[in-house]
Image (cartoon, rainbow, N blue to C red):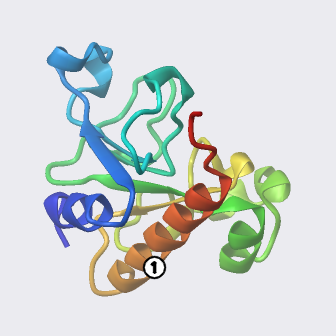
């Protein structure tokens, strides 16, 4: 599964707005090339009120997020807000307890659903280069995250 496959799938979910950061959108240069997925069915939520339910990151953020070694050629990471219960189902412990399990996780392994290296405590999971082992589950998690975002969405009056 390619980065473009994931973008196409997530952007095709009902009510989803997908954006890839670039110079033209005012995003910081470090984020250029990363993609963000929002539930915004009318496309009218102000940027400062939108929060992604999933992202794709294509590079390390030096000094902040380097555990996945995303600077390897062709490696990208799909990040998904799975919530507290989803996180517990996936990993067997609540997000708040992840610090106790962090040493057991190789955040650079490909094609496996993992706790997010930075945002696990907030109920985020990730997959580096979803493929044969994790591809189907990645798409299911994206749908579930979109559904959670839709349930919490409050349209502007």
Label 1 Cα neighbours within 10 Å, binned few <14 / some 14-19 / many ≥20? few
Q: Is residue 68 left or right of residue 71?
A: right
Viewer-proximal residue, 57 or 52? Answer: 52
Q: Position of residue 12 (x, y in %)?
A: 26, 65
Q: Position of residue 13 (x, y in %)?
A: 34, 66
Q: Is residue 100 visible?
A: no
Residue for point 63% across, 44% down: 154
Q: Is residue 136 left or right of residue 84?
A: left
Q: Quadrant of the C terminus?
A: top right
Residue for point 27% across, 58% down: 11
Q: Position of residue 3 (x, y in %)?
A: 20, 58
Residue for point 84% across, 52% down: 96
Quarter residue 104 falls in: bottom right
Element assignment for label 1? helix
Q: Is residue 24 left or right of residue 49?
A: left
Q: Quadrant of the N terminus?
A: bottom left
Q: Position of residue 33 (x, y in %)?
A: 20, 35
Residue for point 55% across, 27% down: 49
Viewer-proximal residue, 36 or 97? Answer: 36
Location of mark 1 (residue): 140
Image position of 34 with respect to 126: above or below: above
Q: Is residue 61 visible?
A: yes
Image position of 62 with respect to 7: above or below: above
Tally of numbered tags? 1
Quarter residue 10 falls in: bottom left
């Amino acid at each position: 599964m390619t980065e473009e496959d994931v973008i196409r799938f997530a952007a095709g979910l009902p009510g989803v707005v997908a954006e890839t950061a670039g110079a033209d959108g005012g995003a910081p240069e470090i984020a250029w090339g990363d993609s963000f997925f929002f539930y915004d069915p009318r496309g009218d939520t102000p940027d400062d009120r939108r929060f992604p339910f999933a992202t794709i990151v294509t590079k390390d953020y030096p000094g902040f997020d380097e555990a996945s070694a995303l600077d390897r050629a062709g490696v990208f990471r799909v990040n998904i807000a799975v919530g507290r219960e989803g996180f517990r189902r996936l990993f067997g412990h609540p997000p708040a307890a992840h610090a106790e399990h962090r040493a057991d996780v190789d955040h650079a392994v490909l094609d496996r659903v993992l706790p997010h290296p930075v945002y696990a405590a907030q109920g985020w999971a990730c997959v580096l280069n979803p493929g044969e082992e994790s591809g189907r589950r990645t798409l299911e998690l994206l749908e579930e995250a979109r559904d959670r975002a839709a349930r919490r969405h409050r349209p502007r009056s």
